[in-house]
Amino acid sequence: MNREEFMILLKDWRVLLLLVLVVLAMAAIFPRPGGGGIETSLQFGLDLEGGSWLQLEYQAEVVGFRTSRPVEAFIADLEKALDADIMLVQENTMEIRRYYTRAELEPILLENGGELLSYEQGVSRVTTEDVKRILEEKLNTLGTRDARVNTLTSLTGVSRYMRVELAGVDMATAQEIVGKQGKFEIRVATSENQTEHVLFGDTITYVGLPSKEPESGKWGVSFTLNEKGASAFREAAITYGAVNNPEAHAFSMILDGETVFSAPLRGDLAERLKNEPIRQFFATTGTGDQGMRDAMALEIHLRAGALPVDVTIAGSGTVSALMGERFKAMSLVAGILALITVAVVVYYRYREPGIVLPMVAINASEVIILLGIARFVQQLDLASIAGIIAVLGTGIDQLVVITDEVLYEGKVPSPSLYLKRLSRALGIIVVSAATVFIAMIPLAVMDLSTLRGFALVTIIGTLIGVLVTRPAYGRVIMGILSRKPD
């Protein structure tokens, strides 16, 4: 192929689109020298980066019931008896947001005019989505980009467990942020050993960054209450005498049952509360590095809010950074070997470098574009790498289909016949791709941990092939074969 023919080929919109996408993908991946070798902007998951995973168990249950009483009155009495929030899921199904065994629940329901029909530990689909959203907000505040929250829902729609994976995060931090409900409460001392509830964290409208008080050197977090919260605080201060005798009625800030701050009102603050509500407060967590870490954790919980139900850690584990680096190297070697194997097999079939090189180049460009898109939508773990290798295999298979179709009986057809055969080959490829696409959709839309990553990578790779690389290959191979004699 001379220079003029090569330039005509480069100006073809299909080939030009392929080249532009490869350049953009390389810019997104941004390979560059780093301290440990070549660094990129790719997001790596727990398998390849190292980090921690936690399996959380909901401390709640979904029960079916029957009662002759009005449902609203029955649930209201039950909430008092159980000291728990209850949400009506369906007409005769409720979610109790506190853990009780079936044996504990049955007599309580009977006492309040109900009968327990079914019992399943866990939460409803609505609560599951709330928990997932709040956890993702907390993880985003933490600053980790490689976090994954996966749920497992039974056929009845009840979820008992949730798995959280945090790449590059140590176990202590993971347990501090993810393994707690994050329930923030302010209470006031009414007597020496008694306190009363004032407000919960849902009345907080603004949370500041962790900072240190210049006078005391203590770390803490400033926050602002809404009008309802400010009124509740003032009412409690007046009702229990904190504005007249602050020293005897200290206010405590409690996070997940642990007091993070407790002190009486300052004199000037007590005087102000007699006349107006106050919305701006500052919760201290202590001095030194521990105080700073506690302040950072408090900020995260205050920003994202409390989980609607309590959770416990049912399982946990870590992947060391050293093991993650080893998996990265093995994945890279596996990808290179797959590409080399593809090249050898294709050469064995056609014995023509002019066909093999474009095939391998197109296949490699497809992987580069796939990685460039995955940089923004999917972190890479071992299952995703398996999806990339699968795309390599199916991609070369489809390129063989195109080559065999246009080289029918080993001859290069005329341009018009070539276009007909290319259209027929692309039709076969589109049907094959549609089959893969449909097969992967269930795995992509369900939270099945690593299987979802495999499905997403496979779908993206299939779309890139059908829309970009296969048409470009058809144009390239036409330019190459047109130079061959019949």
Image: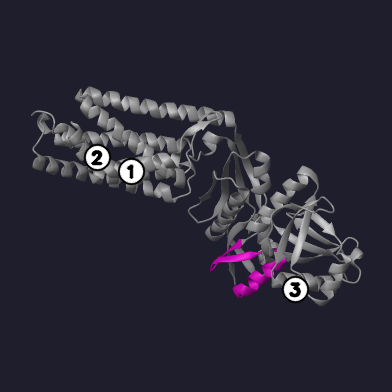
Q: Left or right: 208 with respect to 362?
A: right
Residue 45 is a magenta residue: no
Tags 2 and 3 touching, CB below 8 Å: no
Dot label at residue 20: 1
Q: In terms of depth relative to the viewer, which is nearer, 442 or 158?
A: 442
Query: Circle 3 sits in a helix, a strand or a loop, which is it?
Result: helix
Crowd class of label 2 (few under 14; some 14 to 19; many from 20; radius 10 Å):
some
Q: In terms of depth relative to the viewer, which is nearer, 238 or 150?
A: 238
* Foreground tag (2 vs 3): 2
From what the image shows, is residue 409 above or below residue 163? Answer: above
Which residue shows up at 64% across the image and 38% down it?
170
Q: Left or right: 161 with respect to 83?
A: left
Q: Going from the N terminus, do you reach mark 2 or mark 3 first?
A: 2
Query: Circle 2 sits in a helix, a strand or a loop, which is it?
Result: helix
Residue 5 image position (x, y, % from top left): 18, 36
Query: Circle 1 sits in a helix, a strand or a loop, which is it?
Result: helix
In the picture, which quadrant includes the N terminus? top left
From what the image shows, is residue 79 above or below residue 155? Answer: below
Residue 248 image position (x, y, % from top left): 91, 64
Q: What stretch is highlighted in magenta?
A: 68-95
Residue 75 is a magenta residue: yes
Which residue shows up at 87% across the image and 71% down it?
243
Residue underneath mark 2: 10
Crowd class of label 1 (few under 14; some 14 to 19; many from 20; radius 10 Å):
few
* Foreground tag (1 vs 3): 1
